[in-house]
Image (tube, rainbow, N blue to C red):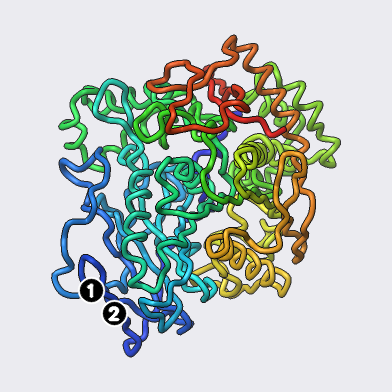
C-alpha cells in the first residue's frame, strides 16, 4: 500500500480558484503607510474594507533567492492599487495547486478591516498563516477571505515562499533553509510597524494558522523575540509538532540539487534554475527521496520533503523543547485523517477497505509496533470501519497528542493555555470541487474548522456556492471568532476553562453546540509509551536534536524552559527506515 495522503496537508483536495472580491467604485479607501499610500476597496457585503497586495519585503529574486527576506525598500510611486490579488508564491507538486498567477515576486499581504475605521481605532489584529505542507497554498485562497470575518478585529493574510524556494537547506553551505518562516516573521514585523494606520493595535496581534500554518505559528511563538511582536497564538491542527533536523533533510535536498545538475555549494547554479525547472525536477524524483508513503511521520518530519528545519540559526533546537512564550490555544479536529484516506481511496473505495489495509497502514507507520497499536485501536471499536480507525490514529498520533504536549509545556511554564476539539461536521462543502455527498464520510476532518474561524457561513463553497450553515453552526462560527479576538484583546478567550496536565479542560464544538468541560487526551499516555519503546528499539534514548544535527541534552540559554520535563521522542518512517530523534515533552 503506497499512499500519498500526507503530501498536501492543510489544503482541501480540489483546485481552488483565486479569491474574487467585488469593490464598489464609490467606496475606495485610502490609507497612508511608511512606504506610501494604499487604495483599498469595499467588500461586497459593504461591512468591511480590504487592502490587497501590499508588499512587505523586497522581491526574493536574483541574489535574494535563498536568502532571508529583506524589508521592503521601495515606494509605491503614487498610490498603490490594493484592489487586486497579488500572485501566489510558486506552488510545488502536481495536485491541489492554487489556481491563478504564480511568481517568485510574491511577498505580499492582504488586510481586511471594518468599514470606516480610523488610525485611532486600535482594533485587535489577527494574522493568518495558511496550510499546505509548505508546498502549496496562498492568501488568495477563497477559504481565507477576510471579508466575512466579524467586524471587531482586523484580519491579515500573507504569502510565504514554498517548496525548495522556501526551505532548501544543506549542511556546510550558505543554504540554511527556513526562508518561508522568515517571510512570515518579516510580514509580522511589517504588520506591527504599520497596522496602526489601518486602525489596528500593534500591541494586540494574534498569530493563528492551520496545519503547516499551525506548525509555523507554534515555532514562531517559541522564538525569544516574539513577545515584542505578537501577544497570543492559536494553532489549529499542527501545534506541538516537531521539524526534521537539517541533517535529516540533507539526503533528499542533496538529491534534489544533484538532479538539477548543480553542486551543493554552487548557489549561483541553483539561482539560475527557473521555478518550472525546480518543480519538474521535484516531481521526477522518487517522492521525498524515501518512498513517500502514507506515513504519519512524513507529516512530522522524517520524510517530509520541504519545510522548516532544526539545527539552523532560527531554530537551534526543537520548538517543542522550548515551548510557546505567549498565551496560546491548541486545537485539533475529531476526524483529522478522513480527508486523506478519502483522497486516496475515493468514497466508493472506502467500503472495500479490509483489515489487511488497516494492518498495512499500521505496519508502514509503526513497524513492529503495529500489532500493539492495532490492539489499542481495534477495528471493532470503530464498527469495523477502516476509514474511522485510520482517521483516529492519524488524529491522535499526528495532531491531538502533539497539541497536548505543547499545551502541557506551556502550562508547566506558567503560561495561560487553552485547548479545543472541533467535532462539528459541516453541513456545507467548504471548498470548490468538494462533493456534498462526501460530508458524511469526512466528518470534522482536517481543514473543516477554517470557514468557521473566517466567518464564512453562507455562499459555500466560496466564492460561488449557495449553501448556508445552520443556526447552530453560525453560533459556533461567531463563538470561535470572538474567542480568537478576545485572546489577543484580553489575554483570554473568554469563558474557556484553563488547561492543565492534571485537568485537561477545554472546549468541544459539536452538533451546533459549545461544550465547556474535559477534553479527552487519555490516549496520549499510550502514544508516549510507544515513543519510548521506539526509542529503545532505535538505541538512541535520552538524546535530542541539536545544532547541525548533533546529539545533545543542552538547551541554549536563549531557549530556556521545559528542559526538566523534556523527554526524547522519535519519528519513525519506513521504506526505507528513517529514524529521527527529537525532544518533546510528554502530555502527562
> Which of the two residues, 242 or 131, is positioned nearer the viewer here?
242
Mark 1 or mark 2, which is nearer the start of the sequence?
2
Mark 2: few/some/many CA within 10 Å (<14, 14-19, 20+): some
Residue at which label 1 appears: 37
**Is 374 displayed left or right of 212 in the figure?**
right
Q: Is residue 343 above or below residue 526?
A: below
Q: Is residue 559 visible?
A: yes
- Going 74% across and 40% down the picture, which residue do you hit? 521
Residue 86 appears in which quarter of the rendering?
Answer: bottom left
Element at label 1: strand
Q: CA distance from mark 2 to mark 1?
A: 7 Å
> Which of the two residues, 500 or 550, is positioned nearer the viewer here?
500
Residue at which label 2 appears: 30
> Which of the two residues, 500 or 42, is positioned nearer the viewer here?
500
Element at label 2: strand
The x, y position of residue 241, in whole percent, is: 55, 36
- Going 22% across and 56% down the picture, which residue do you hit? 72
Amino acid at each position: 500500500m503506497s499512499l500519498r495522503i500526507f503530501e498536501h496537508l492543510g489544503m482541501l483536495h480540489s483546485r481552488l480558484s483565486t479569491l474574487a472580491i467585488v469593490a464598489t467604485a464609490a467606496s475606495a479607501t485610502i490609507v497612508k503607510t511608511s512606504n506610501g499610500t494604499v487604495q483599498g476597496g469595499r467588500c461586497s457585503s459593504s461591512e468591511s474594507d480590504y487592502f490587497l497586495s501590499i508588499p512587505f519585503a523586497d522581491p526574493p529574486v536574483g541574489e535574494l533567492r535563498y536568502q532571508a527576506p529583506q524589508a521592503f525598500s521601495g515606494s509605491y510611486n503614487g498610490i498603490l492599487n490594493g484592489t487586486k490579488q497579488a500572485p501566489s508564491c510558486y506552488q510545488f507538486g502536481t495536485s491541489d495547486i492554487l489556481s491563478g498567477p504564480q511568481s517568485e515576486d510574491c511577498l505580499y499581504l492582504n488586510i481586511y478591516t471594518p468599514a470606516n475605521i480610523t488610525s485611532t481605532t486600535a482594533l485587535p489584529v489577527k494574522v493568518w498563516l495558511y496550510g499546505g505542507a509548505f508546498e502549496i497554498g496562498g492568501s488568495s485562497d477563497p477559504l481565507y477571505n477576510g471579508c466575512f470575518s466579524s467586524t471587531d478585529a482586523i484580519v491579515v493574510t500573507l504569502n510565504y515562499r514554498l517548496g525548495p524556494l522556501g526551505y532548501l537547506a544543506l549542511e556546510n553551505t550558505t543554504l540554511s533553509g527556513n526562508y518561508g518562516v522568515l517571510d512570515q516573521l518579516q510580514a509580522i514585523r511589517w504588520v506591527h510597524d504599520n497596522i496602526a494606520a489601518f486602525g489596528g493595535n500593534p500591541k494586540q496581534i494574534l498569530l493563528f494558522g492551520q496545519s503547516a500554518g499551525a506548525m509555523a505559528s507554534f515555532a514562531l511563538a517559541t522564538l525569544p523575540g516574539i513577545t515584542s511582536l505578537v501577544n497570543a497564538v492559536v494553532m489549529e491542527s499542527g501545534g506541538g509538532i516537531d521539524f526534521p533536523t537539517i541533517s535529516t533533510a540533507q539526503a533528499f535536498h542533496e538529491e534534489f540539487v544533484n538532479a538539477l545538475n548543480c553542486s551543493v555549494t554552487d548557489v549561483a547554479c541553483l539561482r539560475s534554475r527557473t521555478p518550472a525547472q525546480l518543480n519538474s525536477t521535484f516531481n521526477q524524483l522518487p517522492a521525498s527521496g524515501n518512498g513517500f508513503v502514507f506515513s504519519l511521520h512524513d507529516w512530522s518530519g522524517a520524510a517530509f520533503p520541504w519545510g522548516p528545519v532544526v539545527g539552523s540559526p532560527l531554530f537551534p533546537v526543537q520548538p517543542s523543547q522550548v515551548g510557546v512564550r505567549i498565551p496560546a490555544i491548541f486545537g485539533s479536529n475529531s476526524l483529522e485523517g478522513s480527508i486523506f484516506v478519502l483522497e486516496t481511496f475515493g468514497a466508493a473505495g472506502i467500503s472495500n477497505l479490509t483489515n489487511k489495509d488497516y494492518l498495512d497502514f499500521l505496519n508502514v507507520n509503526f513497524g513492529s509496533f503495529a500489532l500493539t497499536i492495532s490492539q489499542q485501536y481495534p477495528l471493532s471499536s470503530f464498527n469495523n470501519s477502516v476509514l474511522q480507525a485510520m482517521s483516529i490514529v492519524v488524529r491522535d498520533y499526528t495532531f491531538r497528542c502533539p497539541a497536548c504536549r505543547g499545551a502541557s509545556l506551556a502550562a508547566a511554564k506558567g503560561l495561560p493555555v487553552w485547548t479545543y476539539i472541533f467535532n462539528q461536521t459541516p453541513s456545507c462543502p467548504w471548498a470548490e470541487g468538494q462533493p456534498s455527498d462526501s460530508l458524511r464520510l469526512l466528518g470534522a476532518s482536517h481543514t473543516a474548522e477554517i470557514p468557521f474561524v473566517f466567518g464564512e457561513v453562507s455562499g459555500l463553497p466560496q466564492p460561488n456556492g449557495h449553501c448556508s450553515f445552520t443556526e447552530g453552526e453560525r453560533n459556533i462560527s461567531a463563538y470561535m471568532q470572538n474567542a480568537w479576538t478576545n485572546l489577543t484583546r484580553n489575554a483570554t478567550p473568554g469563558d474557556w476553562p484553563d488547561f492543565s496536565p492534571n485537568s485537561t479542560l477545554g472546549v468541544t464544538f459539536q452538533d451546533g453546540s459549545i461544550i465547556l468541560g474535559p477534553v479527552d487526551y487519555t490516549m496520549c499516555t499510550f502514544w508516549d509509551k510507544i515513543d519510548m519503546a521506539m526509542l529503545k528499539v532505535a538505541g538512541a534514548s535520552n538524546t535530542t536534536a541539536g545544532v547541525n544535527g548533533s546529539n545533545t541534552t543542552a538547551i541554549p540559554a536563549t531557549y530556556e524552559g521545559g528542559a526538566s520535563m523534556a523527554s526524547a521522542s522519535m519519528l519513525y518512517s519506513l521504506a526505507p527506515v528513517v529514524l529521527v530523534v527529537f525532544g518533546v515533552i510528554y502530555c502527562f
